Image (cartoon, rainbow, N blue to C red):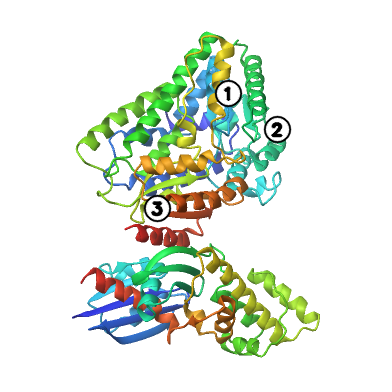
Amino acid sequence: MSDAAHKAMWEKLDLDLEAHDGLLAVLGKFYGDIYLSQEGRLKGAEYLDFVLSEVHGLRIKEIQDAKAAGKKVVGTFCVFVPEELTLAAGAVQVGLCAGAKAGTELAETLVPRGTCDLIKSFVGFKLARLCPYTESCDLIVGETTCDGKKKAYEAFSQLANMHIMEVPQCKAPCDMTLFRSELVRYKEALEKLTGNAITAASLAEATTIVNAKRRALQRLSALRAADPAPISGRDALLINQISFYDDPVRFTAKINELCDEIEARVAAGEGVAPKKTPRLLLAGCPMAVPNWKLPYLIESSGAVIVGEESCIGERNTRDLTDETPADLDGMLDALAARYMQIDCACFTPNTERLDNIAALAKRLNADGVVHYGLLFCQPYSHEAMKVGKAMAAAGIPYLTIETDYGMEDAGQLKTRVEAFVETLA
Amino acid sequence: MSEVAGLDVGSRAIKLVVRRREEVVLSRRLPTTFDPAGQLRELFANGLPERLAVTGYGRELAREFYPQARTVTEIKAHALGAGSLFPQAATLLDIGGQDTKAIALLPGGRVGRFEMNDRCAAGTGKFLEYVATAFGLSVEAFAALALTGDDPPLISSMCTVFAETEATTLMARGVSQANIALGLHKAVAGRTLAMLGRVGLTAPVVFVGGVAKNPCLVRLVAEAVGGELLVPESPDMTGALGAALWLAAETA
């Protein structure tokens, strides 16, 4: 795609072209420093490099083409929005979570200063007209996970067409009933938006697609148990990030190819870091593109990341949707059961997350757990303490980090991470 | 046994310790200034040591002109340094120019749990320096003034800017300068104690870093930990000493 064609497309989406050019330049530089500088990268990472270099280019073009052919585009901020239903309605689903400081001053006119950077970022991207995904959406789904998001959606709904989905905060039978009814309400909203009825056949097909994507990511996760680590945590995080916006069928095929390469690498005993390099599991808040700060600091401090416990990671891929029900009602039950297993910190008491982290650390042969809390994210800040106690009980070394999208604490974070890694060596 | 040097490039001071045959043969300190690279060049004007380990927040900078130098974090370096001076120490407190660290020590100067302040310099040497300047005093004179206080007000803010506002308000209310100075020192000690508590405060505690030269804070921390407080003769040299010890062990 030519530069001129890109520009014309962005202009049509009413992006602030000058600021957008600046954003892409920074992103490109950042990607070069953090990704392209890696040694011993997989050949299959070319797919990642290509997708990221065209993050606002070819993928947006595909989405525009789909729209021209009558498809609708649904934007989401959370792993609670069932992609199965979106695809079954013939719509395209894209994740809109953002991992860069952009339009912060503008965002602070709509949300309080003491709001986390993830929320400020998606509001800022919208107000500063910087995100072609947000601008391509026909519907944006918000969910009532944390207070910060749910109140931000009240303001955001003035700017975009929104559907708000209620996510319960407990896991009692009545909560399951509520979530099941919210699935029906989302299904109806999609049918109204697209004009397509969601049928047992279309939902079964969509479920197969989404489960296949999860299986590919589960396969990747399982391969990372190997020592030496066959793939860097940065690349694995990027794969999880891309899973939210690339075409799911293409993505699945590419990740399975990459896993074939990793299998061969594991069999040959090769990796991205020497055997016995300290292995860390990253837990906590999701890291959206291009929030690669902490993974980069960790992997330039003599450690390798072997897993991501967050929503942009295991929380999104651990559970499959049961494909056995044949009728629509049974399928909706299966969806409700699958999504209510998510161990998000918005639930109380959410003790299953503690067990999941310990089990994951064990399965990945991790030497320690680093918990990342995004500044002002109350649910995960609370859980950082609980996770600390659970890790101490399980005898797993633990470091908790609270930070945001700014770079000014990079030096201090590096000292803390290096010192933690020193204690593991 | 040849020479092993440890260099601690801190935010306020650069410290160098050279050891030969288990003995410290040189101990030097220079202000960091706004040109740490220039200060490092001056420090090594008469030649570079044979083997050098660098710690402190400027450790990567030092490597730029001494690429063979090995680096170690100040957390590990301080633990090793303090552990060698006081093998019985169980908890380490380091307050430097812009960092405060609390470290649970394991036998042999190894690091157990540790806590470190985040990006904000609240409660560090920089904080005391800033408020001393607001009083028109040197840090030494400010500590001496604080020691004469007897009824310190409760100062809750650890933000340097707000603490100054709070001090101004207290002055307007007629609280003596000595008591305000003592209150500000107590605020630092209180914050420090909270951090020590998070790593499981176990006696005896060793207090290192440049701020351990402040007699008022030493007294307050000793009172707060409720027991023996170990302070080395040159508390600000502990990191550089630890770096040298680390390298000697690594290359032994």
Residue A244 pos. (x, y %): 49, 31
Counting other residues with Cα less than 10 Å from the Cα at mark 3, is it few (<14), some (14-19), or many (20 or more)?
many
The residue under the point 32% across, 47% down is: A38
| Circles 3, 1 touching at the beta carbon (< 8 Å) | no
Q: Which residue is mark 2?
A: A157
Which residue corresponds to the image point at 41% horizontal and 83% vertical from the top-left? Answer: B30
Q: Subunit of mark 1? A: A
Q: CA separation, marks 2 and 1?
A: 26 Å
Q: In the rendered image, which residue does mark 3 sit on?
A: A298
Q: Position of residue A265 (x, y in %)?
A: 23, 36
Query: Please, which chain is the residue tagged with disc 2 on?
Result: A
Label 1: which secondary element: helix
Front tag of 3 and 2 = 3
| Quarter occupied by residue B9 | bottom left
Quarter of the image that includes the C terminus of chain A: bottom left
A232 vs B124, left or right, is left
What's under tag 3, amino acid-wise? Ile
Q: Secondary structure at mark 2?
A: loop
Mark 3: secondary structure:
helix
